[in-house]
Image (spheres, rainbow, N blue to C red):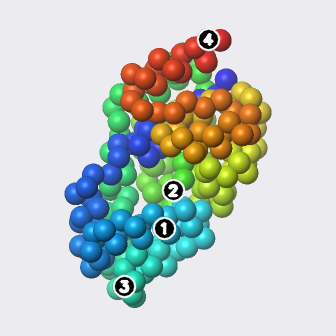
Amino acid sequence: MLVLFDFGEVLGLPQTPRDRVRMAAVAGVELEAFNHRYWAKRQAYDKGDLTAGEYWHAIAGRGLAEETIEELAQRDIDSWLHLSEAVVALHADLVERGIPTALFSNAPVSIADAIDDLPELSTMQARLYSCRIHLAKPDPAAYRAACEELDVAPESVIMIDDRPVNCEGARSTGMQAVRFRNPEQLRADLEPLLVG
C-alpha cells in the first residue's frame, strides 16, 4: 500500500490571513476581490495553463511590472511552505515502517520547485504536481496519471487530502481516501487501512 499525500493544508499549514493581505497590497487589489480572483484562476495556474505573469495580471486586473510579479510569486511560495510538524512526523513514521509514500499536489511550477527542495520530503518515492502532468485534482484523469507515474494500481493507493471533492475524485478511480482534518484524526483513520 502506498500513501499519497496532498501538500497544502495537509503536509503544509494553511495560508494565513496576513499572507493574503500582504499579497493583495502588493497586487494593488482590495482584499475581497483578491481572494476571489486568487481562486478563480488558480486551477489553470496550477495546471500550467497560465504563466505566473498571466496569473498575477488576471488577479490585478491590469499589467504588472516584472519585479511585482516576482514579488507576488515569492510571497505566494512563502505563504504555502510552512510545514505541519505533526504530519511530517507521521510521514516519517510511515517511512520508518517501510510504507512507501509519495506526494500529489495541485501546485504551480514555482511552488512545486520549492516543495521539491524541502529535505523533510526527500524520502518520498516521488513528488507529483498538477503543473507537470497538466491535470489537476479532482479530475479522475489526474489520479490515473499519478498512478501511471508511480507505476501502481489505484487500489493500492491511499490518498490523503483535506478537500472532500478531492477525496471523492480519488475514490472514483479505485483509490482509498482519507479526508484530513487534523493529525490525530489522520493517524486514527489511516492505521486500519494500513493493517487491514
Give the spatial CA distance, label 3 vs label 2: 22 Å
Disc 2 to disc 1, C-alpha distance: 14 Å
Give percent across and percent down for residue 90.
Answer: 44, 24
The tag earlier along the polypeptide, 4 or 3, is 3
- Residue to which mark 2 is pinned: 107
Residue 131, given in percent of the width and then of the height, sits at 59, 60
Q: Nearer the viewer, residue 171 or 159?
A: 171
At 39% across and 22% down in the image, what residue appears?
184
Task: Name the residue type under label 3.
Answer: Leu
Which residue is drawn at the image coordinates 57% and 67% (left, top)?
Answer: 44
| Left or right side of 132 for 163 | left
What element does badge 2 sit on?
Answer: loop
The percent position of residue 51, horizontal first and vertical second, equals: 52, 74
Indicate which disc residue 64 carries.
3
Which tag, 4 or 2, sits closer to the chain's start? Answer: 2
In the picture, the quarter occupied by the C terminus is top right
| Mark 2 or 1, closer to the camera | 1
User: What is the distance, in whole Å, between disc 4 and disc 1 at their CAs?
Assistant: 40 Å
Relative depth, front residue between 94 and 159 = 159
At mark 3, the secondary structure is loop
Which one is in front, 183 or 51?
183
Q: Which mark is residue 40?
A: 1
Q: Which residue is mark 4?
A: 195
For badge 2, the amino acid type reads Ala
* Mark 4 or 1: the one toward you: 1
**Kind of residue sitting beneath label 4:** Val
